[in-house]
Each structure stands twice: as C-alpha cells, then as structure tokens.
C-alpha cells in the first residue's frame, strides 16, 4: 500500500492529570515533546513501522501506542495498548490498526511515575485478510471401521445407509459450521451431513480395506499404522477408509471437502543431517513458540501476520510482488497430500519400514482458496506440532522372510483406533 506520509511533529507537552482523573497521585505530568511520522492511511489488520522521537529531561522508561477516536476535542481509546521498543529517546513499533473506529494514535510516554501523551491523526481502510485458530494441545483419534451397507449389509440392508462415528478424526483449517459453532476438529458424524465442506485432512490408522463385508476382510499388506491424509485419498488402496467416503443418506465426505490443501513436513534432527534442514526447523520452531495467544482482536491480527512468515520465506513464489520483480530466489511450498508415520510398515512391503515423523516434528499446512471474480488464489498457512503419539511397540512382530520387524500384530494395530494423538495447531483461516 502506497500512502502519503503526514508529518505529525507535535510539541506535545503532556496534559495528563492522573491524580484528578483516576485518583492516582503517584502519576504526574511529564514535560515532553513527541515527534512521529504517521501514514495518512493504515491498512486494517496490517502492521505499520512507526518511530517516535521523544525530547524530555528525564529518562524514558516506556512508550505505548493505542488506537483512539476523536470526538470534538476529546479522545476515547478504542484499540488495545501496543508496547514499543525503547532505545534512549527513540521508540519503535510494528503498530497494527486493530480497529476501524480509530481516528488517531495515542502515544503515551512514561518516565518513571511521570507520563506524557499526544495524538497523531490517521485513517484506517480495508478489511482483515483473515483470522487465526489456536489449539494447544488437541486430540486427534483415528476412527475404527464404520458400518455401512457397503461393508455390513446385514446391519444396513438399504443401499446408501450406514452409521456415523463420533471420533475426532478430521481437521478443518478454515472451520466447519456445526450448528451455531465453528469447529476445526470434527467427527464423521459432524462432517458427512455437510458433504465434508471445508474438511482439510483426516487422521487415520491403516489396517484393512473398509469396503469389505465381515466375511471377506482384506488386510492392507504393504502399509500399516498412522497417517495424515487429504480427504481425496481416503479411499486409496493403501489407506482403506472407504467407509468414511461411502455415501450415506445422500451425503458424501468427498463432495465438498477442501481440494487445495497441502502438508509439508519439517523434521527435527533425529533422522540425521541428510533428512532435516536446520535453518528451516529453527524458523518454524521459533515461529510456533512465539505465537503464545490469539484471544483478543489484536492478538489474532498479530498471529495472522506472523504465520504469513511461512509464505514470505518458504513459499514466496505465491506472492505477486516477488513474481513481478523476477526474483531468482523464489521458494515453493511443495508439499504433499499424505504423510504416513511409517512407510512400508506392512508385512508384504518389499523394503524395510521407514519412520517419517515423530513427536517434536512439525507439519506446515497450506490452503489454496479461489477468490471470487479473480483468476488468482489466496493462500493460508498454519503449523501443527506433533506432541504425543500412542505407543506402537506391541504392533511390531517378526515376519517370515523379512529383514526386520513389521507392523503385523493385527490385534494391537486394531487397538490403536480411538487412541489419542496430541498435537498443537496454530493456523490462519478464513473469517466465517
């Protein structure tokens, strides 16, 4: 956004009289001059780099800035207080226009128990680009086989009939409207009646082809165990969740599920130097740890912007400004629609099992959403930290003719259904 800068150079002798207004006699007036250059317009929900210079006879101990609304000659604070970084007599801040009602920015300067404040006029335009959802931790549980006409005709003789399931097996990056509530972790019983609308991913436990009748059970040979998968792959032969996408009462999970969803694994160092990128891991780990809370409007705006670092650093090919500049350092998110905990863990696999992810690793999300009336897409990004995984040790057994163990204790693999895998999720999402 190209805004004309207005110089609000204020000889701001503070008119604070807190002893009269608040009854706090410890706060007294600070004689100070505050100078700051403010854009004529601020974009709602976006940061603006502001620098205030304070001329005062006393050492500055704190500076904060807050959106204010002017009415006649009076000001009312309408935004949340934002703390600046102070070095000597200079205060710097990434200031977020967190309310459309603001007409000014109040700058409050503190020197010990003394205060000074003044106001700088501006205008807020535009709309918020999105919001965020945090959950740390949250449980995902792989759903057991769900009975339908396709796999249990004796119980459900009518074509297109079947049971539901209440296990929290599905993740929606943008949220699913269930009644009056927007939920991001949902069950089959909640998602299927909505045709899977906006459901991004499923957490599954691979064991058998769930389309088979009870007398014709077919176990999946090459692959076993936990996986994260986009909805379109649920009925794949080595995933086996046909029971989730079977049409029941005219509704099908695949019909409106999200199609522009990708995952990118960011491992820790456990797998060795050839299988992790230290710089990338530290970027993601640092970002996840910095994002502490998203309760207030300002916190949500800051978190949305912070999560945009994934795009700016790891997927900048999606940014129009970068493409227009013809940068030779474009990055691409890449990603996949399927992340197994172990690859080739089944008894018929021709190669040894390969562990892919474990607790402490991160999975980045990207959602590509069409923009109405435009040819371009809008991208949203998120982070999931894998925190605690159910014990798989009893699932491994020796298999004749194989070098090493395979996940072939079917009873123990079956016992993994309904066990909680704990993750932390911090993600951008659409405003609903």
Image (cartoon, rainbow, N blue to C red):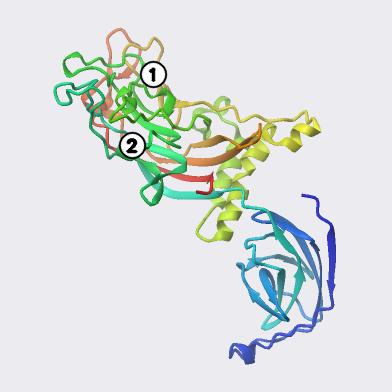
Q: Position of residue 344 (x, y in %)?
A: 39, 17
As drawn, the label of residue 376 is none
The residue lying toward the viewer, choosing from 43 and 407, is: 43
Front in this rendered view, residue 107 or 247: 247
| Rendered position, 414 above or below 428 | above
The image shows residue 431 at horizontal and vertical percentages of: 53, 49
The quarter of the picture where residue 153 lies is top left
26 displayed left or right of 239:
right
Marking on residue 236 = 1
Callout 2: few (<14), some (14-19), or many (20+) C-alpha neighbours within 10 Å? some
Query: Looking at the image, which residue is at 36% across and 41% down?
Result: 186
User: Which residue is painted at 43% across and 38% down in the image?
Assistant: 359
Q: Hey, which quadrant is residue 102 in on the image?
A: bottom right
Please tell me whether residue 297 is drawn above or below residue 341 in the rendered image: below
Of callouts 2 and 1, which one flags the residue occurring earlier in the amino acid sequence?
2
Q: Residue at (30%, 7%) from the top-left corner?
A: 401
Q: Is residue 290 left or right of residue 168?
A: right
Expressed as whole percent of the image width and height from the top left, the position of residue 185 reads: 39, 43
Q: Is residue 429 depicted above or below 218 in this figure?
A: below
Badge 1 marks a residue whose secondary structure is loop
Q: Nearest the camera: 364 or 318?
A: 318
- How many C-alpha atoms fall within 10 Å of the one at disc 1: few (<14), some, or many (≥20)? few
Q: Which residue is mark 2?
A: 193
Asked whether the residues under the numbered discs 2 and 1 touch, taking CB atoms below 8 Å apart as contact, a structural biologist would say no
- Asked whether residue 346 is in view, the answer is yes
Secondary element at tag 2? helix
Q: Position of residue 259 (x, y in %)?
A: 50, 29
Q: CA distance from mark 2 to mark 1?
A: 22 Å
């Amino acid at each position: 956004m190209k805004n004309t800068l207005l110089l609000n150079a204020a000889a701001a002798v503070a008119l604070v009289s807190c002893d009269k207004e608040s009854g706090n006699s410890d706060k007294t007036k600070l004689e100070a001059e505050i100078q700051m250059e403010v854009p004529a317009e601020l974009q709602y929900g976006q940061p603006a780099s502001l620098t205030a210079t304070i001329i005062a006879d006393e050492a500055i101990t704190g500076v904060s800035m807050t959106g204010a609304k002017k009415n006649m000659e009076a000001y009312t604070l309408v935004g949340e207080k934002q703390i600046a970084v102070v070095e000597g007599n200079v205060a710097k801040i990434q200031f977020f226009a967190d309310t459309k009602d603001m007409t000014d920015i109040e700058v409050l300067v503190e020197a010990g128990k003394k205060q000074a404040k003044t106001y700088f006029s501006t205008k807020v335009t535009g709309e918020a680009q999105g919001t965020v959802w945090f959950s740390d931790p949250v449980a995902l549980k792989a759903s057991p086989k769900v009975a339908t006409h396709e796999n249990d005709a004796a119980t459900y003789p009518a074509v297109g009939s079947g049971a539901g399931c209440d296990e929290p097996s599905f993740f929606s990056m943008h949220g699913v409207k269930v009644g009056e509530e927007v939920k991001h972790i949902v069950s089959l019983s909640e998602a299927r009646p909505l045709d899977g609308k906006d459901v991004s991913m499923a957490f599954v436990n691979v064991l058998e082809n769930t389309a088979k009748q009870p007398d014709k059970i077919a176990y999946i040979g090459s692959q076993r165990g936990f996986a994260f998968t986009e909805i379109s792959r649920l009925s794949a032969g080595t995933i086996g969740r046909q029971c989730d996408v079977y049409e029941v009462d005219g509704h099908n999970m695949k019909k409106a599920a999200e199609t522009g969803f990708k995952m990118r694994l960011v491992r820790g160092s456990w797998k060795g130097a050839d299988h992790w990128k230290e710089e990338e891991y530290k970027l993601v780990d640092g970002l996840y740890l910095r994002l502490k809370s998203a309760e207030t409007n300002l916190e949500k705006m800051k978190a949305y912007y912070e999560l945009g670092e994934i795009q700016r650093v790891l997927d900048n090919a999606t940014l129009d400004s970068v493409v227009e500049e013809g940068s030779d350092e474009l990055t691409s998110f890449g990603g996949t629609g399927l992340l197994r905990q172990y690859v080739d863990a089944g008894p018929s696999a021709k190669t040894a099992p390969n562990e892919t992810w474990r607790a402490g690793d991160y999975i980045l999300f990207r959602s590509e959403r069409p923009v109405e009336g435009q040819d371009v897409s809008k991208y949203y990004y998120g982070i999931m930290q894998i925190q605690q995984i159910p014990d798989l040790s009893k699932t491994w057994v020796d298999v004749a003719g194989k070098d090493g163990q395979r996940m072939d204790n079917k009873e123990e693999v079956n016992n993994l259904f309904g066990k909680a895998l704990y993750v932390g999720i911090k993600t951008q999402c659409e405003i609903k």
